[in-house]
Image (spheres, rainbow, N blue to C red):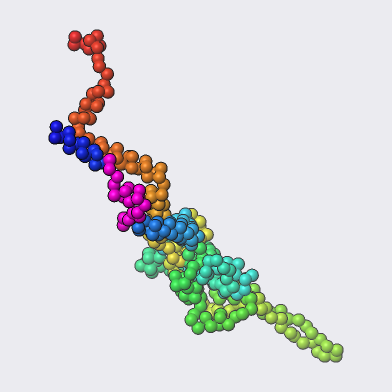
């Protein structure tokens, strides 16, 4: 009897309005909890994170993702091969710089460029140095190939410095840099070419002359200049410049100065995983908070899982037995 009275009192107490419901019915403001107070601010931060992460990914696609994928597709050799300088040309003018071995900036055209071509061998450069091989003993797998600072042929300081690149791989010295900076008119200046001492070039020939005569005056020789192409006279014997390089196994006409497979993979994974992880997490939390249908289904599944875990095993057995159909005497073979 006492137990029945206690159950009735508990049921009546559960039917009474709570403090929040009473305050709402009386028109009094209800104090929000800590989670409810910070929810708008957190939602604003999550929305901003989602938008920024998506914009950052779009920004990284042309500058990081696409170059990294191009490097992987090119399948550069993991160990540097051996390259020898074939030709070094310095050009100024937009029409003269049809291509460039190095550009500081990938979105704008360059008006000053170093055009370097090389011959490359599959012999590892480390073996070339250890065995002290002669350049004449190398078997060239590619000749007169464009030599680029990287796969794109461009970059941004301080990672890419075209002056240092030309000093390291080209045929110029530190004292020649001010001379190049002073050139303002469009010109193509050939600085080096392998075999220059045996093969005469058109640029080394004397410029043509015109004959001018006045009335009663003797003929005069006038030299016609060639401002569009200048060739610097090289010594009779020039040592062949040999350096390490990375050749492409997919594109034989592509050779670069620097390549690191592990760095390429790390850069590609970071540029893809980090922005998309932030975007997906932010959108998931916002959908859970502000999508009633998604939240209701999640709570229903959670309650079902909790009920199954807390359910009495004997009740589970009884329910399964109650669903089993009864057998008749004819179907039961023991009777």
Q: Is residue 291 left or right of residue 119?
A: left
Residue at 41% across, 47% down: 291
Q: Position of residue 271 (x, y in %)?
A: 42, 58
* 92 and 243: which is toward the camera: 92
Question: Residue 21 lies in magenta, yes or no?
Answer: yes
Q: Is residue 6 above or below residue 222?
A: above
Q: Position of residue 314 (x, y in %)?
A: 19, 30
* 264 and 172: which is toward the camera: 264
Name the outermost residue toward the right.
215
Q: Position of residue 6 (x, y in %)?
A: 17, 37
Q: Is residue 209 above or below residue 83?
A: below
Q: Which residues are magenta?
A: 15-34
Q: Position of residue 68 (x, y in %)?
A: 45, 58
Question: Residue 260 lies in magenta, yes or no?
Answer: no
Occupied quadrant, residue 37: bottom left
Q: Is residue 273 left or right of residue 227?
A: left
């Amino acid at each position: 009897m006492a137990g029945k009275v206690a159950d009735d009192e508990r049921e009546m107490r559960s039917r009474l309005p709570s403090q929040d419901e009473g305050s709402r019915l009386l028109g009094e403001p209800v104090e929000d909890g800590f989670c409810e107070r910070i929810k708008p601010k957190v939602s604003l931060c999550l929305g901003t994170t989602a938008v920024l992460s998506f914009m950052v990914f779009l920004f990284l696609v042309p500058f990081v993702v696409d170059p990294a994928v191009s490097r992987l597709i090119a399948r550069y050799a993991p160990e540097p091969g051996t390259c020898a300088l074939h030709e070094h040309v310095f050009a100024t003018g937009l029409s003269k710089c049809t291509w460039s071995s190095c550009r500081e900036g990938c979105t704008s055209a360059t008006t000053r460029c170093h055009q370097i071509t090389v011959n490359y061998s599959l012999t590892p450069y480390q073996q070339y140095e250890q065995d002290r091989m002669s350049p004449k003993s190398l078997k060239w797998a590619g000749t007169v190939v464009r030599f680029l600072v990287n796969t794109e042929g461009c970059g941004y300081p301080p990672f890419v410095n075209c002056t240092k690149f030309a000093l390291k791989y080209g045929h110029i010295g530190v004292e020649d840099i001010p001379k190049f900076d002073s050139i303002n008119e469009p010109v193509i200046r050939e600085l080096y070419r392998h075999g220059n001492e045996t093969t005469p070039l058109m640029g080394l020939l004397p410029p043509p002359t015109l004959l001018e005569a006045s009335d009663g005056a003797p003929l005069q020789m006038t030299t016609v200049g060639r401002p569009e192409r200048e060739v610097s006279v090289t010594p009779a014997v020039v040592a062949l410049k040999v350096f390490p390089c990375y050749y492409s196994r997919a594109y034989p006409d592509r050779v670069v100065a620097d390549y690191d497979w592990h760095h390429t993979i790390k850069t590609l994974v970071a540029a893809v995983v980090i922005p998309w992880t932030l975007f997906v997490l932010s959108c998931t939390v916002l959908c859970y908070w502000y999508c009633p249908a998604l939240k209701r289904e999640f709570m229903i599944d959670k309650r079902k899982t909790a009920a199954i875990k807390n359910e009495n095993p004997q009740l589970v057995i009884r329910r399964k037995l109650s669903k089993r159909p009864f057998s008749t005497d004819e179907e039961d073979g023991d009777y």
